[in-house]
Amino acid sequence: MRSIRFATVAVATAALTLPLMAGTATADPSAGRKAAPHPHAKFDRLRAAAPEGFVVGTAVAGGGHHLEQDYPDPFTHDREYRKVLARQFSSVSPENQMKWDYIHPERDRYDFGQADAIVEFAERNKQVVRGHTLLWHSQNPAWLEEGDFSKAELRAILREHITTVVGRYAGRIQQWDVANEIFDDQGNLRTQDNIWIRELGPGIVADAFRWAHKADPKAKLFFNDYNVEGVNAKSDAYYALVQDLLEEGVPVDGFSVQGHLSTRYGFPGDLEDNLRRFDALGLETAVTELDVRMDLPESGVPTEAQEQKQADYYQRTLEACLAVDGCNSFTIWGFTDKYSWVPVFFEGEGFANVMTEDYVRKPAFYALRDTLKEAREEDCGKKDHGKGRKG
Ligand code: G3I
């Protein structure tokens, strides 16, 4: 059940954001006038507004679809991007830079350059890192997917990869997406397109967790997927699998929902219930890739109602996570539309992030900030009474 505090946040946020929406997506609240200093300027930043122990993250743009665009690598070339990245967030996730095709481009060669740079940036800026990802059906290098390996060789390749990559960053990664998207939307294991499960059977998933745990006993090890926000066939499949693995003593620490949402569909109102059932198994939970895309009008500029609906989806996702004790990591999949993967994958859709291409904050940004602030204040109140967040 959502607590009363969130009902009050919704009202406060709507009141606060409406005037800013009066223009369009390009209306910068600070443009053309000097804004009066905010009485709590520190809490203007998402990371500072958050309750203690609750991290607010973003994907770090690079690789993947960015390679097809005409801009240079965002993380290494865009100074404003880096500034916002450092100021606003307390957790970072490499968008592509730790995936197999980047970090292990040849059988006997690893390329840690981009991943190292992100981890070092995070440490300089007192941010934690979510590692993404170790066992996936996508973005595997051709040498692996098209190689002619025996089962024993494949198993050795995966073990070596996990041991090497997780071992390299041991003690420096807070959470690892060990297994990414291993079920399809019907809740069937991907026995065809996932090379590991196809060739080595489902037991390889447990081994991946065991190897990762051995390489970094402190990192929290997660299952991560999309379309598992609500209670459905796919999240049920994870729920069943996780129970079996926990019974076998496999070191699974968490279940995370990516959160690639669209205003075209209804909000998954059972998100909190879903997180709670995994929480009840003793797992941590997390939101790892939230963005909220929408169908763009011909003008390309969303209406106020669209922006408000988007803000509402962001807010409700955050509220669900905040309401669950063991959900202490909340990550958005990029913060500026400038580098979003959405228009590349979904024709006619976009505007999915909390800032415009020019880094202007949208109602969604303020909804997150205010919701975090409210939760922080409530937690401070609870602490005074000897209670706080767990985990
Ligand atoms: O495979 C081709 C390759 O042959 C070609 O040389 C290269 C250069 O143009 O493109 C390659 O495909 C690209 C792929 O990344 C691998 O680099 C795709 O075009 C590109 O669109 C793709 O984008 C990434 C996508 O994952 C791949 O699934 C996005 O940047 C990244 O944001 C996205 O992130 C995923 C998470 O990891 C998991 N959850 C869903 C999320 C959104 O799709």
Image (tube, grey):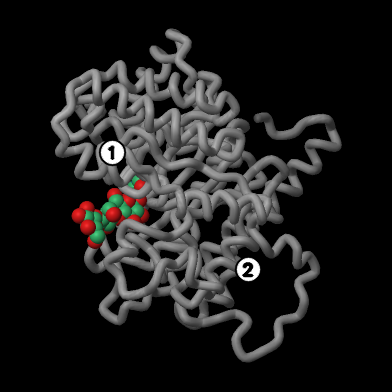
Q: Is residue 242 left or right of residue 6?
A: left
SS at badge 2: helix
Query: With 162 as the anchor, is 379 left or right in this view?
Result: right
Q: Quadrant of the N terminus?
A: top right
The label number, if any, that marks residue 16 in the structure image: 2
Q: In the image, what residue type sits under mark 2?
A: Leu
Q: Where is residue 385 drawn, in percent x and y? A: 84, 33
Amino acid type assigned to the residue bearing label 1 in the image: Arg
Q: Using the image as rendered, state which of residue 32 and residue 64 is in the foreground.
A: 64
| 69 up-or-down from 386: above or below | below
Q: Residue visible at 23% across and 20% down?
A: 200
Please determine whether, in this image, residue 23 is positioned above or below residue 289: below
Q: Check the image and report above or below for 15 versus 9.
A: below
Q: Residue furthest front?
A: 108
Whole-percent x, y for residue 87 in the image: 65, 63
In the figure, residue 352 lies in which quadrant? bottom left
Instruction: Give the residue drawn at x 59%, y 31%.
Output: 326
Residue with the mark numbered 1? 107
Q: Is residue 363 visible?
A: yes
State the mark number for residue 268.
none
- Seen as rendered, the residue at the extreme bottom is 32
* Point 55% across, 45% down: residue: 129
Crowding at dot 1, Cα within 10 Å, few <14 / some 14-19 / many 20+, comes out as few
> Which of marks 2 and 1 precedes in the sequence?
2
